[in-house]
Image (cartoon, rainbow, N blue to C red):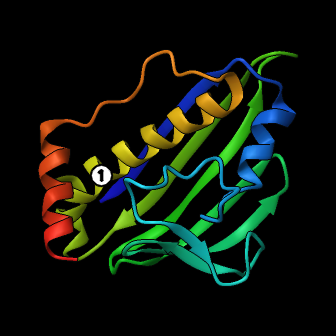
Amino acid sequence: MAVYNVHERLLAAKGSEVGALINTISAAPGDRLSPGRDWPAVSFDRGLAVGSAGGHGPIRYTITAYVPDTWVRFTFTGPRGFHGFHEFAVLPVDEERTVLRHTLAMRTSGLARVTWPLAWRPLHDAFLEDSLDRAERACTGTVARPARWSPYVRVLRALARAFS
């Protein structure tokens, strides 16, 4: 099954400010993009650099492209059945507004054809919206419309905690 999933947020910030957020992805104390305490920490074995392996929770990937302040691409290595990538891109609109876009493009195979729509996608969508809230707060000091987890995502999160 082909999957194409995009989340983006128009931020009232210069491209350089939004790009600086991408440079902090690592789950270190200075990470200003990863959602943090409510989600598994993002980490890499060699920091934010091409060839570095890492992920968050059971989602594993390798950094296959990185242009500081602009773009980073992660190619999936797990879970089994995820074949593709996800990436963050900084897209300046004008001098004072920038779109931060996250794109996931993959094929699923095997059990992932079932687990993606039933579990991974709702969790992924909630994770990304929390991340974009964090980006908006970092750039503007506030979040105009904070993301809310659906009851289904709350159940999935409770199940994940119970089995971890």
Residue displayed at 65% across by 65% down: 28
The residue where tag 1 is placed is 123
Q: Is residue 143 above or below residue 87?
A: above
The answer to which image quadrant residue 91 occupies is: top right
In this picture, is 99 found above or below 69? above
Query: Residue 131 placed where, x, y %?
Result: 51, 43
Name the secondary structure under disc 1: helix
Up/down of 149 relative to 116, above or below: above
Horizontal and vertical percent position of residue 133: 51, 33
Place of residue 117 in the rendered image (x, y in percent of width and height, measured from the top left): 21, 53
Q: Quadrant of the N terminus?
A: bottom left
Q: Quadrant of residue 72 in the image?
A: bottom right
Q: Quadrant of the C terminus?
A: bottom left
Rendered view: 91 above or below 164: above
* Count of labels in the image: 1
Residue type (three-letter) at the residue carrying disc 1: Leu
Say which residue appears at 84% left-offset and 56% top-offset: 67
Name the residue nearer the viewer: 112 or 150: 150
Q: Residues within 10 Å of mark 1 (few under 14, many from 20)?
A: many
Q: Position of residue 31 (x, y in %)?
A: 66, 55
Residue in front for this viewpoint, 132 or 86: 132
Image quadrant assignment for residue 15 = top right
Residue at x 74%, y 69% (from the top left corner): 48
Determine whether, in the image, residue 81 is placed left or right of residue 49: left
Q: Residue at x 65, y 60 (%)?
A: 29
Q: Residue furthest front?
A: 29
